[in-house]
Image (spheres, helix red, strand yellow):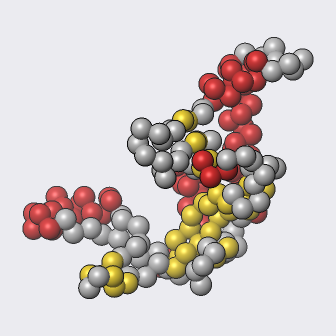
Amino acid sequence: MNINNSRLGSKDRVNKHYGMHEYFQFYKRGNNRYNNINYIIFSKVISRLNLKLGDILIEKRKFRLPYVGMLNVYQEHRVPYIKDDKVRNAKPVDWLATKKLWSENEEAYNKKVVVRYSNKDTGGYVFRFYYSKFQSTMKNKQFYYIEFVRSLKIRLKERIQDPIKTKYKAFNKPGHV
């Protein structure tokens, strides 16, 4: 879990990342009769818990963390649009294909032409993890955010592209059709 407030000035901004080591220190300080485990066991337990949480989140598409909020998988249909007389494309960049194009075509490299995913296999939808603080009862919840690790995003991609399982359907992001 991370703490950040971008609305404050740079000298007043609080950027703090809490990782496994900080949570282990917090666990050891507590008055818990079970706090006699070492860091390696603690790390394995938390990692296994996070893997299970990721599996539940991918399959159920939502997971409520008490007092913290809701974790969701959303889908967005991204299409090019015009803003300030310029065409904007919000689809994700395919960096592997872009770098291959740049190595083969110097003019494309100089113009910074990028190749974007078409997402034909998902019907043009882009899937994202989303942390909603709406149901959170924490104090100062505007300062918290959750970053989802890349391995979880890769597991979601593999689940979406799995031909054996049923078609993956996620929630539409609020405000999008």
The relative height of residue 56 versus residue 75 in the rendered view (above or below) is above
The quadrant in which residue 59 appears is bottom right
The quadrant in which residue 40 appears is top right
Quadrant (top left/top right/bottom left/bottom right) for the N terminus: top right
Left-right relation of 68 to 7 = right
- The front one of 55 and 165 is 55
The relative height of residue 176 versus residue 63 in the rendered view (above or below) is below
Q: Residue at x 72, y 24 (%)?
A: 26
Residue 63 visible (yes or no) = no
Q: Residue at x 9, y 68 (%)?
A: 107
The relative height of residue 121 versus residue 155 in the rendered view (above or below) is below
Residue 101 location in percent, x, y? 21, 65
Residue 52 location in percent, x, y? 74, 46
Q: Residue at x 68, y 20 (%)?
A: 25
Q: Residue at x 74, y 40 (%)?
A: 49
Left-right relation of 123 to 83 = right
Residue 102 visible (yes or no) = yes
Left-right relation of 114 to 3 = left
The relative height of residue 21 versus residue 94 in the rendered view (above or below) is above
- The front one of 19 and 84 is 84
Residue 147 location in percent, x, y? 56, 48
- The front one of 23 and 137 is 137
Quadrant (top left/top right/bottom left/bottom right) for the C terminus: bottom right
Residue 94 location in percent, x, y? 36, 64
Which residue sits furthest right?
A: 33
Q: How many numbered marks appear?
A: 0
